[in-house]
Image (cartoon, coloured by chain):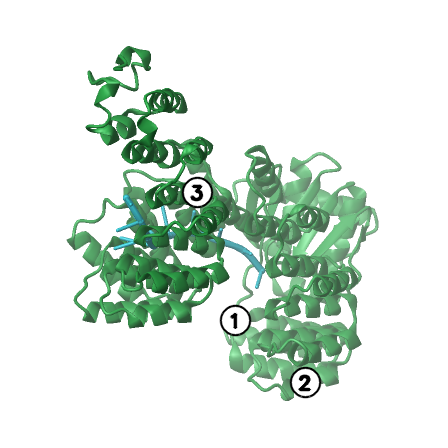
Chain colours: A green, B cyan
DNA sequence: GTAGGGTTAG
């Protein structure tokens, strides 16, 4: 019986054909014109009624429409499938593909098992589909079993099957096996090579990608856009600008600049090779920018520490109504962390929640790191607890965050909890652990961890770990032992190591080793002004004013200028950057007045700037800069005139909080009733009601 | 009908 098309929604079936024409050209009719499940339902009903279900071509097309073409109708496909008495292999294949597309690889594997139980013979298509499912699931065991069956059924030499096999092994972490399959192939197409590239990329074997690419150039396969995307990604990771630029020329020459994915990988390559502005000009020329392109550019700025530009670009992205994803937010948060932009980052967290983004491990860890780097360890811990999945990095961030926020013991508690959960620590974890010992003054524990990391975990200490040990010993007053420790290091100590020792000498007033440290430092970094000042301050602290002045004049002779301290302050979400002696800031005059008023107030409340450093600096600096001598004071003052009492003022960047500043800030927090969070390199000082929570300040 | 690709945290 012919059914008139008027029974079906006119929007979807507009042809003048009738359903009776289905057997003649069923595919175009159903596949191309069926737009909703409702359409499908009507056709299905008709097919059942007219007995056409027995026609495998019709059924397969119905299945394909529901499992693959129409989104969200896989259950419908399954219902049709179950009505079939003896489904053909093709019917199974369609459903397996459908499950793959629907991100249900486990169901695909289950269906394949069912297929085998029902003794339905798989064909070559079945195997590519099912291997794809295994690859997605990282189901190595199943994949291996399937490889055995491929051989058994004689499909082992099919190119398509082998390509998926390579992909499956590589995605399951077996790049070596993937490579063996690759090497044993008598003929390799572009996709074969690309599958291998993707395998090496997945396991971060970037050198292998470039190496294999040069081999590919020697062969006569040629390469395509997909190849270039993989190779460009590798160039970025390796900093191989030369090859990257070569590919750029090729892309221009061949007129491939219209491929958004390709240009995005070019942008990523340039940004990661340090050519952020080149990346930006490519980005600006894009006729269309999707979320990945935006994210690549934002992360480019973020990784180049051009955080302000990263945030500006994120803002622009929102203006253009491009929905950011979890990955975008990771770079944005990382920028907030570096800048110490607490209010902005908190807003980002709110935004993430509002958009119901998934708290992935990466996003969660970026959030944790952001809170920890803004001195808000409670929030960091809260995010950690809410994360459904945590990895070594999440634990490491927590341990480091607790350590730098003065909770060394708690950091160590989390380290042992991490061990109980069988999370394997790595080299970075131990930097956190050692810095926790240093902050908590746990010298013996520090020594024990240092030995343990190699003995129990097979992690060879790097120079950073040696640096931590010097800090632990030096802060603990064991200056001589710290000095011997440096002498016995298996590698050449760097400036950071000697500077750590020098800083300890300043705390514990050790002139002799302090002098030796500076001698070493001058060899390594002769123009680092802070080092001379540290030694000068050591002399001052023991009353050797002449020597202190001598160091300062030596500096002058060598033409070494004090590098202006930079600080930034966040007030109600706005970020202001200050450099010492900075008169360029539009509010400078206002700030100067405010500083003077503030100084009057805190002096009348009992604050006397009287330390040795302050006295020396006052003699050293010209009058004009005496007010801005400590840029943090300036910033605090700016906060004072802009915020209401009770507002937390955050000061970040690489300031060094000297004793004088520390005391001044204490007074300010008391007199003006402010909570002030100061980030002094990697440590946080929380000033509240006239005292600071840190226990390691001298 | 079947295979490969760009952005992410310490």
Residue drawn at (73%, 69%), measured in percent from left and top?
A: A438
Image side of residue A534 versus residue B2, left or right? right
Name the image quarter holding the C terminus of chain A.
Answer: bottom right
Q: Position of residue A576 (x, y in %)?
A: 56, 44
Q: Nearer the viewer, residue A486 or A142?
A: A142
Front label number (3 vs 2):
3
The residue wearing badge 3 is A99
Name the image quarter holding the N terminus of chain A.
Answer: top left
Q: From mark 2 to mark 1, how far is it between C-alphas? A: 30 Å
Q: Position of residue A150 (x, y in %)?
A: 36, 61
**Residue furthest out toward the right:** A606
Residue drawn at (80%, 43%), measured in percent from left and top?
A: A671
Q: Chain of mark 2?
A: A
Q: From mark 3 to mark 1, how far is it between C-alphas? A: 67 Å
The residue wearing badge 1 is A560
Q: Chain of mark 3?
A: A
Q: Position of residue A84 (x, y in %)?
A: 40, 35
Residue drawn at (62%, 58%), measured in percent from left and top?
A: A655
Q: Chain of mark 1?
A: A
Image side of residue A630 versus residue A527, left or right? right
Q: Nearer the viewer, residue A403 or A115?
A: A115
The answer to which of marks 3 and 1 sits earlier in the sequence is 3
**Number of other residues with Cα within 10 Å of mark 1, as a class: few under 14, some 14 to 19, many 20 or more:** some
Q: From mark 3 to mark 2, how far is it between C-alphas? A: 60 Å
The answer to which of marks 2 and 1 sits earlier in the sequence is 2
Front label number (3 vs 1):
3
Label disc, if present, on residue A485 of the rendered structure: 2
Tell me where residue A506 sits by quadrant: bottom right
**Number of other residues with Cα within 10 Å of mark 2, as a class: few under 14, some 14 to 19, many 20 or more:** some
């Amino acid at each position: 019986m012919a059914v008139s098309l008027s029974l079906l929604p006119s929007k979807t079936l507009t042809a003048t054909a009738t359903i009776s024409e289905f057997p003649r050209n069923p595919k175009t009719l159903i596949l191309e014109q069926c737009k909703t499940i409702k359409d499908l339902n009507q056709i299905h009903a008709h097919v059942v009624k007219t007995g056409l279900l027995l026609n495998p071509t019709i059924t397969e097309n119905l299945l394909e429409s529901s499992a693959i073409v129409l989104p969200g109708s896989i259950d419908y496909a399954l219902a049709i499938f179950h009505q079939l008495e003896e489904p053909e292999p093709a019917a199974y294949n369609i459903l397996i593909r459908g499950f793959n597309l629907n991100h249900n690889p486990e169901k695909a594997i289950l269906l394949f098992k069912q297929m085998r139980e029902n003794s339905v013979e798989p064909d070559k298509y079945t195997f590519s589909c099912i291997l794809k499912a295994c690859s997605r699931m990282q189901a190595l065991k199943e994949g291996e079993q399937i490889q055995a069956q491929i051989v058994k059924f004689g499909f082992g030499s099919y190119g398509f099957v082998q390509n998926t096999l390579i992909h499956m092994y590589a995605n399951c972490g077996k790049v070596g096996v993937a490579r063996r399959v690759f090497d044993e192939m008598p003929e390799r197409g572009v996709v074969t090579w690309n599958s291998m590239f993707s395998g090496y990329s997945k396991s971060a074997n970037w050198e292998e990608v470039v190496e294999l690419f040069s081999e590919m150039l020697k062969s006569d396969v040629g390469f395509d856009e997909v190849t270039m995307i993989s190779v460009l990604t590798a160039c970025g990771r390796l900093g191989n600008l030369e090859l990257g630029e070569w590919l750029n020329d090729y892309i221009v020459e061949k007129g491939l600049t219209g491929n958004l994915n390709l240009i995005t990988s070019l942008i990523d390559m340039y940004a990661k090779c340090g050519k952020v502005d080149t990346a930006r000009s490519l980005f600006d020329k894009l006729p269309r920018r999707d979320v990945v392109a935006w994210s690549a550019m934002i992360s480019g700025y973020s990784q180049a520490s051009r955080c302000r530009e990263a945030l500006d670009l994120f803002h622009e992205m929102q203006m253009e109504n491009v929905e950011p994803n979890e990955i975008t937010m990771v770079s944005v948060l990382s920028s907030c962390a570096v800048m110490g932009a607490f209010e902005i980052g908190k807003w980002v967290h709110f935004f993430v929640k509002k958009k119901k983004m998934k708290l992935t491990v990466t996003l969660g860890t970026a959030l944790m790191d952001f809170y920890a780097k803004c001195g808000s360890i409670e929030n960091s811990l809260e995010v950690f607890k809410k994360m459904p999945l945590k990895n070594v990095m999440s634990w490491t961030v927590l341990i480091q965050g607790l350590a730098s926020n003065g909770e060394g013991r708690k950091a160590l508690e989390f380290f042992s909890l991490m061990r109980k959960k069988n999370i394997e620590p790595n080299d970075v974890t131990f930097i956190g652990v050692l810095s926790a010992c240093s902050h908590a003054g746990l010298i013996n524990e520090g020594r024990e961890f240092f030995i343990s990391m190699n003995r129990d975990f097979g992690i060879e200490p790097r120079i950073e770990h040696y640096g931590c040990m010097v800090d632990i010993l030096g802060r603990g007053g064991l200056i001589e032992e710290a000095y011997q420790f440096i002498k016995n290091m298996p590698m050449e100590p760097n400036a950071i190591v000697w500077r750590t020792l020098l800083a300890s000498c300043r705390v514990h007033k050790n002139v002799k080793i302090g002098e030796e440290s500076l001698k070493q430092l001058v060899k390594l970094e002769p123009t680092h002004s802070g080092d001379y000042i540290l030694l000068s301050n050591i002399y001052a602290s023991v009353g050797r004013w002449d020597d202190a002045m001598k160091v300062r004049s030596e500096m002058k002779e060598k033409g070494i200028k004090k590098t202006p301290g930079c600080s930034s302050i966040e007030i109600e979400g706005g970020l202001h950057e200050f450099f010492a002696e900075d008169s360029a800031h539009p509010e400078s005059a206002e700030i100067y007045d405010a500083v003077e008023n503030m100084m009057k107030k805190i002096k009348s409340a009992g604050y006397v700037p009287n330390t040795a450093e302050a006295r020396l600096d006052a003699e050293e600096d010209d009058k004009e800069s005496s007010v801005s001598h400590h840029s943090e004071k300036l910033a605090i003052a700016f906060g004072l005139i802009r915020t209401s009492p009770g507002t937390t003022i955050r000061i970040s960047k690489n300031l060094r909080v000297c004793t004088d500043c520390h005391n001044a800030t204490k007074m300010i927090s008391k007199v003006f009733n402010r909570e002030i969070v100061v980030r002094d390199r990697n440590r946080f000082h929380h000033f509240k009601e006239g005292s600071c929570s840190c226990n390691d300040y001298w």
